[in-house]
C-alpha cells in the first residue's frame, strides 16, 4: 500500500495526522505558519489510507487497519527514532493508537479537537442548544 506523505524541513520528527475524509492540507495550512520561524523540525504530513492522495486498499476494513498501515509507514521513514505526533479529530484517535503501540518512541502528543470515543451511541455530549433562529 502506498501512503502519501510530505516531509518538510530537517530535525526532530513531528508527524501530522488529519481528520476523517480530509487530507494533509488541513494540517499543513494550520501548522506550517507556526514552523516558518522555527528551525530543527522535520514535519511529516500524512494522508491517511484511502484519503487525500493515499490509495485505498481492500485490506483496510477498520481503524485498526489504518493504524497498522500508518505504523508501517513510520517504521519505514523514521525507523527507531523518537518523534512527536499531532492529530486532528480522527487523526487524534489514530495518534492515540500510535502512542499506545510506540510508547518508547513517542516523546509528545498534540491533540486538536480529538475523537476520543468512536461509537456515537457511547458518547456523552451536552444537549444541543439553539442560541438564535
Image (cartoon, helix red, strand yellow):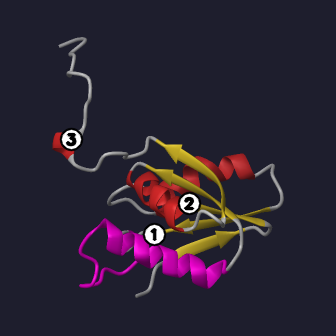
Mark 1, residue position:
47
User: Which residue is most to the right?
Assistant: 39
Disc 1, disc 2: CB below 8 Å? Answer: no
Disc 1, disc 3: CB below 8 Å? Answer: no
Quadrant containing the C terminus in the rendered view: top left
Magenta residues, start to end? 52-79
Decide if residue 13 is in sight here: yes
Mark 2, residue position:
16
On the image, the x and y values in percent for residue 110 come to 58, 47
Disc 1/disc 3 C-alpha distance (Å): 28 Å
Residue 67 placement: quadrant: bottom left
Residue 106 placement: quadrant: bottom right
On the image, the x and y values in percent for residue 69 come to 43, 78
Residue beneath the point at 50% across and 81% down: 72
Does 49 appear in magenta?
A: no
Query: Which mark is first along the chain, 3 or 1?
Result: 1
Mark 3, residue position:
122
Secondary element at tag 2: strand
Could you tell whether 132 is left or right of 25 in the image?
left
Query: Which mark is first along the chain, 2 or 1?
Result: 2
Disc 1/disc 2 C-alpha distance (Å): 9 Å
Amino acid at each position: 500500500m502506498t501512503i502519501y506523505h510530505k516531509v518538510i524541513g530537517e530535525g526532530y520528527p513531528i508527524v501530522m495526522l488529519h481528520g476523517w475524509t480530509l487530507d494533509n492540507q488541513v494540517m499543513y495550512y494550520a501548522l506550517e505558519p507556526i514552523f516558518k520561524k522555527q528551525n530543527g523540525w522535520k514535519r511529516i504530513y500524512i494522508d491517511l489510507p484511502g484519503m487525500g492522495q493515499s490509495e485505498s486498499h481492500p485490506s483496510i476494513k477498520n481503524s485498526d487497519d489504518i493504524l497498522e498501515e500508518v505504523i508501517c509507514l513510520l517504521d519505514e521513514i523514521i525507523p527507531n527514532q523518537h518523534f512527536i505526533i499531532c492529530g486532528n479529530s480522527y487523526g487524534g484517535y489514530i495518534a492515540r493508537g500510535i502512542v499506545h503501540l510506540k510508547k518508547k518512541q513517542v516523546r509528545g502528543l498534540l491533540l486538536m479537537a480529538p475523537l476520543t470515543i468512536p461509537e456515537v451511541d457511547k458518547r456523552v455530549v451536552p444537549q444541543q442548544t439553539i442560541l438564535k433562529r
